[in-house]
Structure formats: C-alpha cells, structure tokens
Image: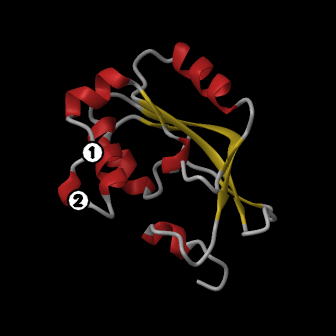
C-alpha cells in the first residue's frame, strides 16, 4: 500500500477473519474505491471473489488490487516471493504463481481508498485514470 492510499480501519480484521475460515487460500484482497488527490471519488473496482486456478486468473485479467493483498507467508516463501527481473509486472507474476499453490480470494467490501494521480507508477493504475 502506498503512503497516499487510505486503509479502512477494519481492513486487516476483515481479511484475517476471512483467511481464518479459508485455510487453503494463498492471498486475499478486497474491493477498492478510487480517489483523487483531494480524497474524493466514488468509483469502486471489484475483483473476482474466488480464483481457484491459473486459467481462471488469466481469464479474469484483474486478479487483485496489490495494495489490499494479505498473503500467507508459507505460500509466499514456497514460490520464492517477488521476482525482481519482472519489475513493473511483479505483482501479476506473483498472483499467477500464488494461485497455483492455493486459491486467491477477494472480499467484496471496499477496504482501501486507492489514490489516483498522474504520478501513479503502475500501468494498470494509469489505465484507470479519468480520460484514459
């Protein structure tokens, strides 16, 4: 999560509770609300509730909002974490490798306000900017 994003106060509680009931889940994210530099915005991005395999993840396209990710350490260590050689798409690479180890899930609740501005680093972030 970037310093200018805003996590909802109950975010980690909701996600940890979800993981407690889904022992095989490798990572859980959430829906996000897009906000501007002033903290205003009402556009919500929702991600697939459950992805159980690589094919589902590839077809879905948008897998998970990186700043909302809560991962199980055992799965992350098993796949070796992020691969620096894939800078710029390291999160997508990580999700695709994690879903091969255990399902990926997203809670439908908005748990993060994601700040959008022209300086966003990610290609996906820039694609969501108004006028793009």
Image check: 81 left or right of 63?
left
Point 73% across, 29% down: residue: 10
Classify residue 7 by image quadrant. Answer: top right
Label 2 Cα crowd, 10 Å radius (few <14 / some 14-19 / many 20+): few
Q: Which residue does the numbered mark 2 point to in the structure image?
A: 86
Labels 2 and 1 touching (C-beta < 8 A): yes
Point 78% across, 62% down: residue: 39
Image check: 31 left or right of 125?
right
Q: Which residue does the numbered mark 1 point to in the structure image?
A: 82
Mark 2 and mark 1: span between their CA atoms? 8 Å
Q: Front-most of 55 and 43? A: 43
Residue projecting furthest to the bottom: 131
Residue 93 vertical placement versus 69 (above, below): below
Residue 85 x %, y %: 18, 58
Q: Point out which mark residue 115 bears.
A: none
Quadrant where the C terminus sits is bottom right
Query: What is the secondary structure assignment of the residue under circle 2?
Result: helix
Q: Front-most of 63 and 131? A: 131
Residue 43 x %, y %: 74, 63
Point 73% across, 69% down: residue: 36
Residue 46 x %, y %: 63, 51
Label 1 Cα crowd, 10 Å radius (few <14 / some 14-19 / many 20+): some
State how the image is colored.
Answer: secondary structure
Query: What is the secondary structure assignment of the residue under circle 1?
Result: loop
Point 63% across, 68% down: residue: 116
Image check: 59 left or right of 77?
right
Residue 56 x %, y %: 38, 46
Q: Front-most of 91 and 98? A: 91
């Amino acid at each position: 999560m970037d310093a200018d994003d805003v996590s909802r106060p109950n975010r980690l509680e909701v996600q940890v509770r979800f993981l407690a009931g889904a022992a095989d889940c490798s990572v859980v994210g959430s829906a996000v609300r897009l906000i501007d530099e002033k903290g205003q915005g009402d556009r919500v991005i929702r991600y697939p509730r459950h992805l159980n395999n690589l094919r589902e993840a590839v077809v879905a396209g948008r897998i998970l909002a990186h700043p909302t990710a809560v991962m199980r350490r055992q799965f992350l260590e098993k796949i070796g974490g992020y691969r620096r050689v894939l800078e710029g798409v390291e999160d997508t690479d990580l999700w695709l490798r994690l879903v091969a180890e255990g399902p990926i899930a997203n809670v439908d609740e908005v748990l993060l306000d994601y700040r959008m501005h022209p300086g966003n680093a990610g290609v996906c972030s820039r694609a969501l900017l108004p006028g793009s």
